[in-house]
Amino acid sequence: MVENNTHKPEQGAPAKKMDQAEIEIYRQAKTIERVITIQQLKRRQRLKDIVRKFGIYALLALGAVSMVGPFLWMVTTSLKEAGDVYSYQKEWWREWIPTTFVWQNYVKAWQVVPFARFYLNSIFVTLLITLGQVSTSALAAYAFARLRFPGRDRLFFGYLATMMVPGAVTMIPVFILLEKFGWIDTYKAMILPAVFTAYGTFMLRQFFLTLPRDLEDAAKIDGCSYFGIFWRIILPLSKPALATLTTFTFMGSWMSFMWPLIVMNTHGKFTLPIGLAYFQNLHTTDWTLLMAGSVMMILPILIVFTFNQRFFVEGIKLTGIKG
C-alpha cells in the first residue's frame, strides 16, 4: 500500500493565527464593548445619585416644614381676629393663610402689658449675661489651654464635672445664697449666677488647643505678655468659636423663664418670657396678642443669628483648610 503523506490537523490542535486586520477588528469590538459597559455603569450611577439626592432633599424638606410650620402658624395667628383662632367653621387653609391682617394686635400687645419695659429688661439682662459669660469663659479657657501650672488638668476636670449636676439641684442653694446677700428681686440675682459656665469654658478650651503655637512663641520672643497674646492673637483667631458661644448664650438668656420668675417679685423688673405669661389667664388665652408678642420676642434672636452666621461659615472654611 502507498502511504498518504498528507497530514490532517489533529483534533484539538490550535487554530490558524488571525491576520493583522482581524486582530484590529477584534480590538475595536472589545473597545466598543468596554465603552458601552462604562456608559451603562455611568447611567446607573447617575440614576443612583439622582435617587439619593432626591431622598436627601425630601428629608430636608420634611425637616424644614416641621420647623417652619410652627413659626408660620405663629405669624399668621398674630394677624388674625380673636374669634378666628381655632374656629371649626372655615376651610383648613385659612388656618395658615388669614384672609384679613389685623396689624392692631401688635399695638395692643404693647398696650395691654408694659411690653416696652419687659423688652428693655430682657435686653439689659441678656447683654450683660452674654458679655460676662463669653469673657469669663474665654479667660478660663485660655488659662486651661495655654498656661502651665500645677494641678491644671485636675482642676479642669473638676470644673468640667459641674456640668453633670442638673440646674434644678443647684437652684435652691443658689437662691438661699442670694437671699443671704440680699440680692433677691434685683438684677444681680439674674445676672451674676449665669455669668460663669463650664460649658463655654470647655468649648473654647477645645478650640484654643487647635490653634498653632508658632504665633504665640513669636509673640513671646517679641516681649508680648500673656494677656497681650490672649488679646492680640488668641481672640482674633477664635471668632467662629466666640460667635457660636455668643449665639448660644444670648438665646439661652433671652428665653430664660424659670430663674427670673423665681428671683424676681417686682412687676417692673420682669423679662419678656414672664411678660408673655400675662396673656394667659386661668381659663382663657388671648392667642392673637400672645403670638404677636412672641413674634416681637423672636426678632432679636434672628438678628443675632443672622449676624453671627458668617462666622460659622468662616469656621467651616478654616476647618477644611487645616486638613
Image (tube, rainbow, N blue to C red):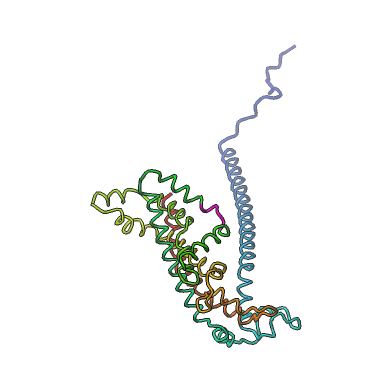
Say which of 101 and 18 sits in front. 101
Residue pictured at 50% horizontal, 69% vertical: 184
Magenta stretch: give its range.
162-166
**Numbered label tally:** 0
Residue 125 position within the rendered picture, expressed as x and y whole percent measured from the top left: 46, 71
- Judged from this view, the residue extending furthest toward the top is 1
Residue 235 position within the rendered picture, expressed as x and y whole percent measured from the top left: 36, 59
- Judged from this view, the residue extending furthest toward the left is 222
Q: Is residue 266 left or right of residue 54?
A: left
Using the image, determine if residue 198 lies above or below residue 78: above
Using the image, determine if residue 291 lies above or below residue 254: below
Q: Is residue 63 left or right of residue 142?
A: right
**Quarter placement of the N terminus:** top right
Residue pictured at 46% horizontal, 71% vertical: 187
Say which of 310 and 134 sits in front. 134
Q: Chief secondary structure of the magenta span?
A: helix
Say which of 117 and 299 sits in front. 117
Residue 285 lies in magenta, yes or no? no
Using the image, determine if residue 88 lies above or below residue 54: below
Say which of 53 and 268 sits in front. 268
Residue 145 position within the rendered picture, expressed as x and y whole percent measured from the top left: 39, 49
Residue pictured at 50% horizontal, 81% vertical: 116
Q: Is residue 158 left or right of residue 23?
A: left
